[in-house]
């Protein structure tokens, strides 16, 4: 099991979780659902990598993180953000 870092933020009535190590996202009505979907995405891409090792993956850049945090407006989000450890 690997350790991943997830940033969670609200998006309308949903929560979105972004994995900083690979740029994958999960979304759901609760933080737990968003994290569970992110874990599913990570598990799925890891299964693909076992068969196709050339699948591109890279950490989220500062620019991409900024876009994630400001996607609904041009100003930084005032909503609380949360960092979580995710094991997948």
Image: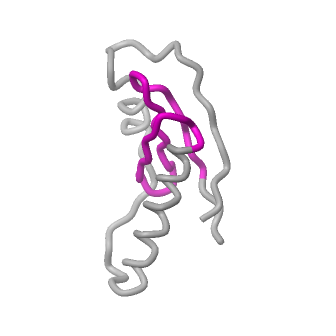
* Vertical comparison of 7 with 53: above or below: above
Identify the magenta region: 5-32
In the rendered image, residue 71, in percent from the top left (x then y), is placed at 33, 26
* Residue 86, quarter of picture: bottom right
Q: Quadrant of the C terminus?
A: bottom right
Residue at point 56% right, 45% down?
6
Q: Position of residue 60 (x, y in %)?
A: 43, 48
Point out residue 10 in the picture as x, y percentages from the top left corner: 48, 26
Q: Residue furthest front?
A: 29
In this view, 58 is above or below 46: above
Q: Residue drawn 52% across and 13% down? A: 78
Image quarter where the N terminus lies is bottom right
**Magenta residues, dominant SS class:** strand
Q: How is the image coloured?
A: one colour
Taking the image as shown, residue 74 lies to the left or right of residue 37, namely left
The number of numbered discs placed on residues in the rendered structure image is 0
Image coordinates of residue 41 in percent, x first then y, are 43, 60
For image coordinates 39% across by 33% down, the residue present is 68
The residue closer to the viewer here, 42 or 53, is 42
Q: Nearer the viewer, residue 66 or 17?
A: 17
Q: Front-most of 52 and 40?
A: 40
Q: Residue furthest bottom?
A: 51
Residue sitting at 37 percent across and 39 percent down? 64
Whether the magenta-drawn stretch holds residue 6 is answered as yes
Q: Is residue 78 above or below residue 30?
A: above
Does the magenta segment cover residue 39? Answer: no
Residue 21 vertical position relative to residue 75 in the rendered view, above or below: below
In the picture provided, is 38 more to the left or to the right than 84? left
């Amino acid at each position: 099991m690997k350790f991943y870092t997830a940033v969670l933020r609200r998006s309308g009535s949903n929560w979105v979780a972004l994995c900083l190590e690979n740029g994958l996202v999960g979304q759901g009505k609760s933080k737990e659902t968003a994290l569970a979907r992110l874990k599913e995405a990570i598990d799925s891409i890891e299964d693909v990598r076992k068969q196709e090792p050339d699948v591109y993956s890279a950490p989220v850049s500062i620019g991409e993180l900024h876009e994630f945090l400001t996607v609904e407006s041009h100003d930084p989000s005032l909503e609380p953000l949360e960092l979580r450890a995710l094991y997948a």
